[in-house]
């Protein structure tokens, strides 16, 4: 009975979203449902629930700052023409349209997300995909499908939580998560090609897909195995970019076009952000600070805001671009942030009240059939919390306990939890709303609609050159469909992986 009641907030969320209710209203309705269920059935002490929500305050502030800084940085890069230069360079260097999309989706996005986390990979990727010629809805979908290395996002704190709560080794979890990610990379990459170019052109680019996904997977696994988990996603993304560019250079199709697009200062904001994050992580580690307000200030939130504020100077442009960019950012930021906060509050309430544990315990009664369900449990946490860390906090311990009851290796089932929760967090409603906002705002290559426009030497179909509205329902439905296929595959792997 408790398990059935615990599903109500989830069903309310999915039902309202399917009915095309705005994400914010769906989140508020789900939160209200969870509050009613908690008060009437789970009867958890109100003081403990309040303390659990209050404990999330630094996280809420951090997420709000990250969202504002990420949108503002994207706005500035677009207004100064920097995104166009980067898009031209990637298009010219990749040599083919399919390779360019894969380079952004399985190279640039994993690198950015693994380094900073919190969905910042889409902040970097979506404007580049628009510049390559994808329509705004397609760019939003492909950008979200690039969030495939979230287990290693922000140098893997979410996976660390899973390892600690699940009672498994951190490096062992990394290796198992890497092994499980092979179908994630392949299916997400294939879906991105189909969305971008259609089934026929996607099939023609199968070799490019295998190369990109294989490089990312092999590098992530090798780093996890020989070095450790935190740097696996970062090095995997960099290696994938290098390999794809090397293939293009050996083919001789991109050198001239790429050479005509000077980068120079265009990369300075990203370089400043990366350097600042690495230095601050080192300083926080030496000081023994892992959470709290100092961690928020010296983490992605603080550095994104500082980078955005300094971007006009780093790019050598007029500082007058900052006020209008800030005003435009605020207009798009508040609703994304409010939706994110409500869903985070919902995820915290589900965990603190015991509803998440009730769902997992009910699943354990299925016996071996639970293994097919395990990825979906992780996915529910990732989807609702919008965070791998939050989802693992909800379900990692119960997944490990269930594994012991089923005489199944806990390290493997916690890895299933980790990978599925991480992937689903990339399709969370707040992420979708952010992706839609970025895609609507980012300009595509200039040119009449329906023409082939050269982007740095690569002909990419430009469906429209004007601002486009993005149907968030289409984006969410497409991403969740791809994720659902992956979860089915992960469930089958879990059954066979004994």
Image (cartoon, rainbow, N blue to C red):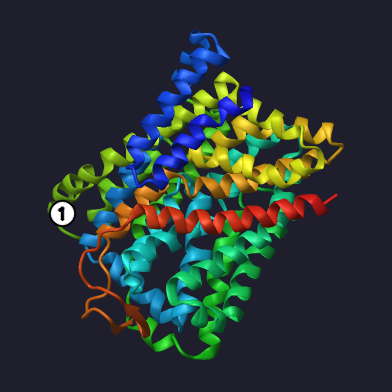
Residue 342 in the image: above or below residue 383: above
Q: Which residue in the protein does label 1 denote?
A: 321
Residue 401 in the image: above or below residue 158: above
Left-right relation of 441 to 417: left
- In this view, the residue in front, 173 or 286, is 173
Residue 381 in the image: above or below residue 80: above
Residue 363 figure quarter:
top right
* Residue found at x 50% / y 72%: 193
* Residue found at x 35% / y 49%: 434
The x, y position of residue 208, in whole percent, is 57, 78
Residue 408 figure quarter:
top right
* Residue found at x 49% / y 72%: 194
Left-right relation of 267 to 172: left
- In this view, the residue in front, 422 or 274, is 422
The x, y position of residue 329, in whole percent, is 23, 47
* Residue found at x 20% / y 44%: 331
- In this view, the residue in front, 317 or 240, is 240
Q: Is residue 165 visible?
A: no
- In this view, the residue in front, 161 or 250, is 161
SS at mark 1 in the image = helix
Badge 1: few (under 14), some or many (20 or more) residues near its Cα, within 10 Å? some
Q: How many marks?
A: 1
Residue 165 in the image: above or below residue 300: above
Q: Is residue 464 visible?
A: yes
């Amino acid at each position: 009975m408790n398990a059935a009641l615990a599903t109500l907030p989830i069903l309310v969320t999915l039902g309202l979203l399917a009915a095309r209710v705005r994400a914010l209203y769906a989140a508020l309705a789900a939160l209200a449902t969870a509050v009613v269920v908690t008060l009437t059935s789970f009867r958890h002490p109100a003081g403990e629930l309040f303390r659990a929500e209050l404990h999330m305050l630094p996280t809420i502030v951090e997420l709000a700052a990250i969202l504002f800084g990420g949108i503002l940085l994207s706005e500035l890069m677009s207004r100064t023409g920097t995104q166009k230069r980067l898009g031209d360079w990637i298009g010219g260097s990749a040599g083919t349209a399919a390779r360019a999309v894969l380079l952004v989706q399985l190279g640039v996005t994993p690198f950015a997300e693994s380094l900073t986390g919190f969905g910042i990979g889409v902040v970097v990727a979506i404007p580049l995909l628009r510049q390559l010629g994808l329509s705004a809805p397609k760019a939003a979908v492909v950008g979200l499908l690039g969030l495939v290395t979230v287990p290693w996002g922000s140098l893997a704190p979410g996976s660390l939580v899973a390892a600690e709560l699940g009672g498994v080794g951190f490096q062992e979890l990394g290796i198992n998560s890497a092994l499980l990610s092979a179908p994630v990379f392949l299916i997400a990459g294939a879906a991105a090609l189909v969305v971008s170019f259609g089934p026929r052109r996607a099939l023609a680019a199968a070799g490019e897909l295998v190369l990109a996904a294989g490089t990312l997977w092999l590098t992530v696994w090798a780093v996890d195995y020989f070095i450790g988990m935190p740097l696996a996603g970062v090095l995997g993304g960099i290696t994938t970019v290098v390999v794809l560019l090397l293939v293009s250079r050996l083919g001789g199709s991109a050198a001239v076009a790429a050479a005509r697009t000077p980068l120079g200062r265009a990369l300075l904001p990203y370089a400043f952000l990366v350097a600042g994050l690495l230095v601050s992580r080192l300083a926080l580690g030496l000081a023994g600070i892992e959470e709290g307000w100092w961690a928020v200030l010296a983490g992605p939130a603080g550095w994104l805001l500082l980078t955005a504020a300094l971007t006009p100077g780093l790019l050598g442009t007029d500082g007058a671009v900052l006020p209008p960019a800030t005003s435009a950012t605020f207009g798009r930021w508040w609703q994304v942030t409010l939706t994110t906060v409500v869903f985070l509050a919902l995820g915290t309430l589900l965990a603190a009240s015991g509803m998440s544990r009730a769902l997992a315990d009910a699943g354990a009664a299925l016996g071996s059939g639970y293994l097919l369900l395990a990825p979906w449990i992780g996915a529910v946490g990732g989807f609702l919390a919008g965070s791998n860390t939050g989802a693992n906090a909800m379900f990692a311990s119960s997944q490990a306990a269930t594994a012991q009851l089923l005489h199944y290796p806990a390290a493997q089932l916690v890895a299933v939890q980790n990978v599925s929760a991480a992937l689903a967090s990339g399709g969370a409603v707040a992420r979708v709303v952010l992706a839609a906002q970025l895609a609507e705002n980012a300009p595509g290559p200039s040119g009449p609609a329906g023409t082939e426009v050269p982007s740095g030497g690569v002909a990419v179909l430009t469906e429209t050159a004007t601002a486009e509205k993005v149907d968030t329902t289409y984006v969410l439905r497409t991403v969740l469909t791809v994720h659902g296929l992956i979860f089915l595959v992960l469930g089958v792997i879990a059954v066979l992986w004994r």
